[in-house]
Amino acid sequence: MTKTTKSTEKSFEEKLAQLNKLLSSKDGATEIAFKNVYGPHAMSVLREYVERKESVPPRATKPSDKEAGDEGKKKRRAPRPPARYGQKEGVALPSKEEYKTALNKKYTNTASNLVEDGYAAIEELAAEAREVAENMESGNLGQTSRCQTFQETADVLEGITISMLPGIFGEVELVRLPTLSDSTSRSHRLSEALDDLRMACDAVESWVEAEKTQREIEAEGEETGEEDDDTDYQEIEDAIQEIRDHADEAEGVEFPGMYG
């Protein structure tokens, strides 16, 4: 006979109740407590629902006997305490649905903005790669494989430029949540830029498919069997393909070294 294992995973309501209890306590709640309930982007929305408590000064660390005897040695500093938050008077934390709506609204962007940001990042990385290569050349390191790789990377990225986008890119909206990585490496920044380009293309592609389907449905109800449509789908699809090709091309470059 198989025993049924009862799930120990707490529901959102149970987690929220615990969080509210922390907020009303003397010590308050840390950012981790909010993330455990709402997810990794919690504080980007919830800061307006809570107020920060005055930081409790860290306890002084008692020096060891040796440290106490050495006047020239500095005492160790206690770790900085995490920020703590309490409930704003008369303000209740949002439900799961309310939080998701607020989060999506905060990070809704247009496809054109994502594309423009992606190409801007590529342009910036191209300039950095070219600068590194030129500095190495001036330092008699122009024949090294590292310098040659940066030259090749700069050549590729400098050849990737944005074309005029069809107007629909400025109308299609999508949610782009910020990255959770703290990395500032060139490889990571390029990866983020390419993600932006591809996400924008996916969103516009979905719009095209939905629009074409709707047009077909509407056309079936017309006596002529055809609905007037002045949308240049080929232009949109060509733009999507060009952006995807650029993303694939940029994906193959390398940033060797410490900051790659």
Image: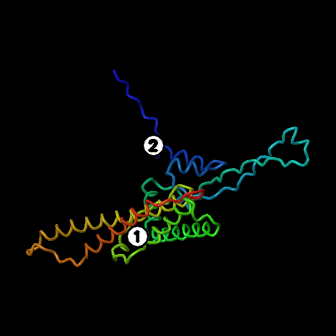
Left or right placement of residue 115 versus residue 79 in this view: left
Residue 224 horizontal/vertical position (percent): 9, 75
Disc 1 target residue? 110
Mark nearer the N terminus (1 vs 2)? 2
| Quadrant housing residue 236 | bottom left
Where residue 90 sits, quadrant-wise, is bottom right
**Residue closer to the observer: 202 or 60:** 202
Q: Residue beneath label 2, please?
A: 11
Q: Amino acid at mark 2?
A: Ser
The residue drawn where x is 58% and y is 46% is: 21
| Mark 2, secondary structure of its residue | loop
- Note whether 74 is above or below 187 in the view shown: above
Q: Position of residue 219 (x, y in %)?
A: 14, 71
As rendered, which of 223 and 250 lies closer to the eye? 250
Task: Work out whether residue 240 or residue 154 is closer to the camera in this orientation and state it.
Answer: 154
Q: Amino acid at mark 1?
A: Thr
Residue in the picture at 53% in, 60% down: 255
Circle 1 Cα neighbour tier, 10 Å, few/some/many (<14 / 14–19 / ≥20): many
Can see residue 90?
Answer: no
Q: Relative to residue 259, is residue 218 drawn left or right?
A: left
